[in-house]
Image: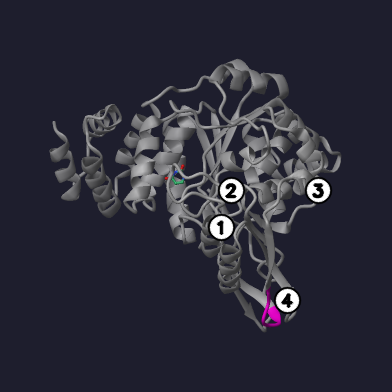
Amino acid sequence: MNIQQIIAKKRDKESLNKEEIKYFVEEYVKGNITDYQAAALVMAIYLNGMTDEETTELTLQMAHSGEILDLSSIGKTVVDKHSTGGVGDKITIVLMPIIASLGIPVAKMSGRGLGFTGGTADKLESIPGYNTVIEMDKFIQNVKKIGISLITQTANLAPADKKLYALRDSIACVESKPLIASSIMSKKIAAGAEKIVLDVTVGNGAFMKTKEDAMEISEMMKNIGNLANRETICVLTNMDEPVGKAVGNTLEIIETIECLKGNMPQDIKTIVLEIGSYIIKLSGNGENIEENKRKILENIENGKAYEKFIELVGNQNGDIEYIKNPDKFPKAKYILPVISEKAGYVEKLDAEKVGVTSVDLGAGRIKKEDSIDYTVGIWLEKKISDKVEKGEILAYIHANGEEKGKQAVEDIKQAYQITANAIKEPEYILGIV
Ligand code: URA
């Protein structure tokens, strides 16, 4: 067997067998297959697709390309959560302390931002001192000690996915259903949780632009989960506009703190309640979804979720004074308003454009090795269906350069579409698979 034959098979729309997929993953990780050969195969997969059997095999091979975590010493069912990516998506940071405050263990590894989508690990690192890079035994000890640890993916977790993801990003091959499904599920299987809840984002700020595509990839991931003995539920959420008001690392942490104090925008609240209720259900702590939602609201109202977040930050070396007093966070030099030129209702708020603008301001990376500016971003005062007066503020740009700031004001103005007719509040949950 050689890589040329494997590339030729996929180029000619044939299916790859287990041995061929195993050979490709193993030899690519070892460096015996070059990036240009892997790129040719990935492009052939992007164009010609994969069968369910091929997608499952690719997932399992990537999962086993590094260590598979054993979380059994935690002694309780661990439910993992993962989002397929979006703009302003701080659901993990809001939700997981709530789950931990209910006595359900949280051992979660998150990724960094790539493209126009943000990453949970970057957002957490905007809290001064917060350490996301932690050894596995310390990670498990943290969960045993305080019930929660949020860290970044270790180097040896599904290394094949790390290598392939970076390659896909550099050759415009991210948006492929079998490649996204296998990328996500390989990391989730390697991360050790028995049960998985996936937030499958749908819309202009997500990789899945339509509900049909999101349903299809959800079925794929659910099947892979079942075959790997990991019960998986997918919650389809709306990503036509950014989630919440803040886009950018520090700004999103400030919004998270507000949410945990009970001040949640409607979209965050709806998504947190829905995904959280399924995590509680899969953990074996409550069959009834409505009752689970009530438990979540109770732990926000009684302050237990907020206290758990403080405990999490402190336990990972973060300075909790910033959480207690968010005014302490460093701010961008320029805070510029985006002013509406019309009266009416917000009909569209282009999430991808907001994400790209935040990357242009410095909140994200163009290349993997770029450093990011935690202070910059966008604060959205108006969201879809909100009423707007002429001259009212739509959003604030947080920038560290005057020219960049002015450009962002223009870009965000373009991201809004305002109409004379009243608009219904969007549906935030689009389905459960
Ligand atoms: N998130 C991932 O982890 N992998 C993908 O391919 C896309 C989104």
User: x, y percentage for residue 224?
Assistant: 42, 37
User: x, y percentage for residue 6?
Assistant: 17, 39
Residue in view at x 57 percent, y 17 percent = 137
Q: Which residue is mark 3?
A: 262
Structural distance between the alpha carbons of marks 2 and 1:
8 Å
User: x, y percentage for residue 28?
Assistant: 27, 32
Q: Is residue 45 left or right of residue 107?
A: left
Q: Earlier in the sequence, mark 4 or mark 3?
A: 3
Residue in view at x 62 percent, y 47 percent = 374
Whether residue 422 is visible here, answered yes or no, is no
Q: Which residue is mark 2?
A: 373
Location of ligand 1 given as a quarter of the image:
top left
Which mark is nearer the camera, 1 or 3?
1
Residue 50: in magenta span: no
Which stretch appears magenta? 339-344
Secondary structure at badge 1 equals: helix
Image-quadrant location for residue 431: bottom right
Structural distance between the alpha carbons of marks 4 and 1:
26 Å
Q: Is residue 116 left or right of residue 57?
A: right
Which mark is nearer the camera, 3 or 2?
2
